[in-house]
Image (cartoon, helix red, strand yellow):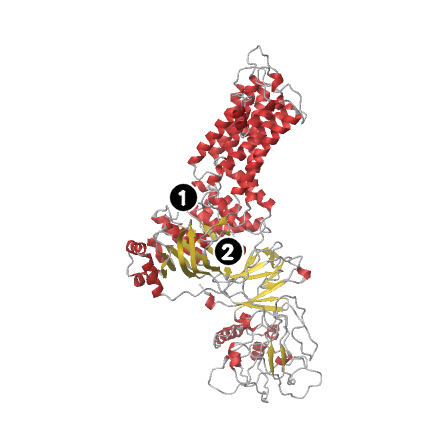
Amino acid sequence: MRTDAFAFPLTVFAGSTRYTFSPGREVTVGRDDRADIPLDNPEDNQYTSRIHLVLRFDGRNWLAIDRSRNGMFVDGERVTTVNIRDGNSVTLGDPQQGPRLLFRVGAAAEQAAGPPDRRTRGGPGQPVAPGRQPARGGWRTPLTARPSSSPGPRKWPPSQPTTRSGPPSRSLSEPPTDRVRTSPPAQPPSQPTEAQPPAAAPTSRRPEPSQLPTEPILVAHPSPQPPAPQRPTRPPPPRQPGWAAEQAPVHPPERRAVEQPSPAAQQELRPDIGERRQGADHKSLALAGRVAGALNKLRPRSTAPRPHEEAPTRKLPQTGAGTAAAVAPARPTAPATRGLQAHQLNVAVDGRQVLAEVSFTASPGTLTAVIGPRVACKTALIDTLGGLRQPSSGELILDGHDVNAPSVRSRIGVVPREDVVHRQLTVEQAVGYAAELRLPPDTSGDDRRRAVHRVLTELELDSQRTVQIANLSNEARKRASIAAELVAGPSMLVLDEPTADLDPAQERRTMATLRKLADPGRVVVVATSSLDRLDVFDRVLLLTSRGATAFAGPPAQIEAELGTTDWSEIFDRVSADPQGAREAFLAREEAPQPPPRPSEAAPEQARLGLWRQIAVAARRQAWVIVGDQRYFIFLTILPILFSAVALLRPGHTGLGEGDPYGAGPDEAVQLLVVLTMAAVVMGTALTIRDLVGERSVFGREQSVGLSPSAYLAAKVLVYSVIAAIQAAIVTTAVVVGKGAPSSSALLLGDSVLELYVSVAATAIVSAIVALALASLAKYQEQLMAMAVLVLLLALVFCGGILPLNGRNALAVVSWLVPARWGMAAAASSIDVERIDLLATRDTLWTHSTGQWLFDLGILIAFGVAGIAFLRWRLRLPARTSHGPHHRGDEPTDQVGRRNGGSPEE
């Protein structure tokens, strides 16, 4: 794998401006002023986004990743990712009218003098001035030719070609200082006269890099009357940073004879002319190119910044005879740091120290193991690396940015111990919904499907895409959780005990998968208790029982530094004497240096709007309910069961007026009790176990941008629809099977409709109340007690079995039970006091529009209060550490602790 140290820089041509970047950080392209390549031409605003592209070196190649609404196009076809090759170009926003970027990679990019897509012609015999193309604004460096000669004699090795970038049919503008005017040789006037390099002095010494040609030399066409031979003249070149600054002072060039180059030399000097000639020797060009690349590597190195690392600037270099180029102060750029840098991290959980001055680094493409005798220390470190817990002190930098910046958290994938996908969904559904919530909002459906297919193939889940996650093995479920994180393309992946509960074969395959995930250039950090597989890791971080560092380095150095590879002995030692282990580590290692100051965070990636989040979460919630087949069947049977109970009640008057002296004079009241209890049971059964089962899933999705309001609104919407359908089934069965109400309508024009509204509202509010109670539960076992309590209170205080009128204490308590108001609204809608003369008189049952609306209003108020309570419980909580509170995204015990572990584990 090519590392950053040996990777080629990337040169990007945007209009008339050239930008060069070395591997080491992500490069942003967009119309935002803070972008590394700003696209601020007003004419292009309709096509470009604030962050349109991200350029990233993945360890092997440069990649262009689309982050825009209008897309990125290659040859007229929209793509999401481009594997950048030398000479590639992309069009942004619109394949015909959008701005165009051209990429050069490697030595050819260093020699390119201008963008090939901007062609400027001069008349015959007239030099073309540089920098005349219209600039596009932003912090840029207009194109200027680099000096092609040193102050001393120029040497022209015959095997050194001059490389031009871009299509051969386009010419690049060069400064007049790089032109040599010559007299035409004895040949037909229609043939152009080409530049003739000075003859190289005989020498056995290898040419110095400063004496090699670095730019093509353009010549003017001859006039009809051949001019007299002229001496080549050129002003002193500007000093280059680094090796060029160490050359001798500038002297005027000596007068030299100019020889006519051979056709092969002309081919090397002018590839655009050589390519127009049918007899060009392409094999010679290829060989010359390889020699040029080899000689380019012989340039002396210097501590000064290299030219491709200089920041872009707006101003033209001010050059003149005998003066060096003056460049305007450049905009500071982000440090060229990639990977993870942790420095002096301190973390406390519930007032107890779990991390103490932990420092380490992890480069792209490395796999790091976090081990230690105390689980809480490892989990706290994983939470901190993932941005889920705020350290009390210390610095944590990823790719030059603070981990806690919102734009950086989207680049981190976190896989906790619990599954972060719904077990009721299939693998493809779970990863697909994760892609919808995490990818940019302008990502098309085809692009999302391709992203899902890519990660499923990478994790070898393609053959199991239609299998429910609940039916997968432990290993496959863990890979499904990893797939949900990889779909957004994070640059760092942290995992907490991914091999827990796996057999040795599954453990080996999981470790091999993690190794494969790190190789393309990701930073992968794993908290693990699997000590037999440390050979697959690049680095090992050993924490003591107090969270301090006892070892940090390659696994091969463990025995040399710790004196043994017996982990039971090592763990006993770092547990019994954690301070001594830490001091021994500090004595072996140099004091860690603080990382560079974090650069300004890039703009946060655009996220789905609230309504789109609600739509996605609602569709997923519906599939989660349907996917749990046994529970779905139970929910389907419930309304049928209560309908049967109502139909089996003796009597024939139903909800009509009863005979006080006949059989069943109180049939209407009893049917209302059945309807009310059916609504309470169906609503409670819908949601009582919901939040406990989704605790880890919601916590992770909340940290990457899912709005708690959207999450809650989707649940309320789906469960309300289901509760309304169930209420319709029961109400229809009672009305059709037992008899419709004989009372007059109050507000809606139909007493049956008003009865249905009362029953449906009771079912919906009961579902919301049960959902609120579920948010208080920490364990599944607590849910059964809550459900039983809700049903008993509803049965006793609904007012249909135990008379409450006149019993002040019971009446006051009943006001706190939603079933009391649901029963009152139903009784008011059918005028129970008239149709059942023996029924107890209750002021809440009065048959009037005002009383019915009052009863419904109180019932709805319970639902609104439940939603407000749920929103507060699901709020974006404050991450606590040892010290002040910090704003963050970690779901704590408000909906259940994310990792379920205590500091003493």
> Residue at image x 63%, y 79%?
319
Q: Could you say which is closer to the camera, residue 689 or residue 424?
A: 689
Drawn side of residue 42 relative to residue 563, left or right:
right
On the rendered structure, is 668 left or right of 575? right
Query: Which label is found at residue 473?
Result: 1
Secondary-structure class at tag 1: loop
Query: Would you say residue 194 is visible in this rendering?
Result: no
From the viewer's perspective, is the residue at label 1 or at label 2 nearer?
A: 2
Q: Position of residue 18 (x, y in %)?
A: 60, 69
Q: Position of residue 15 (x, y in %)?
A: 64, 66
Q: Quadrant of residue 551?
A: bottom left
- Of residue 738 and residue 449, the one placed in the foreground of this image is 738
Question: Which tag, 1 or 2, sits closer to the chain's start?
Answer: 2
Q: Which residue is mark 2?
A: 404
The local crowd at label 1, few if under 14, some if 14 to 19, many if 20 or more residues have their Cα within 10 Å, is: few
- Looking at the image, residue 231 lies above or below residue 878: below
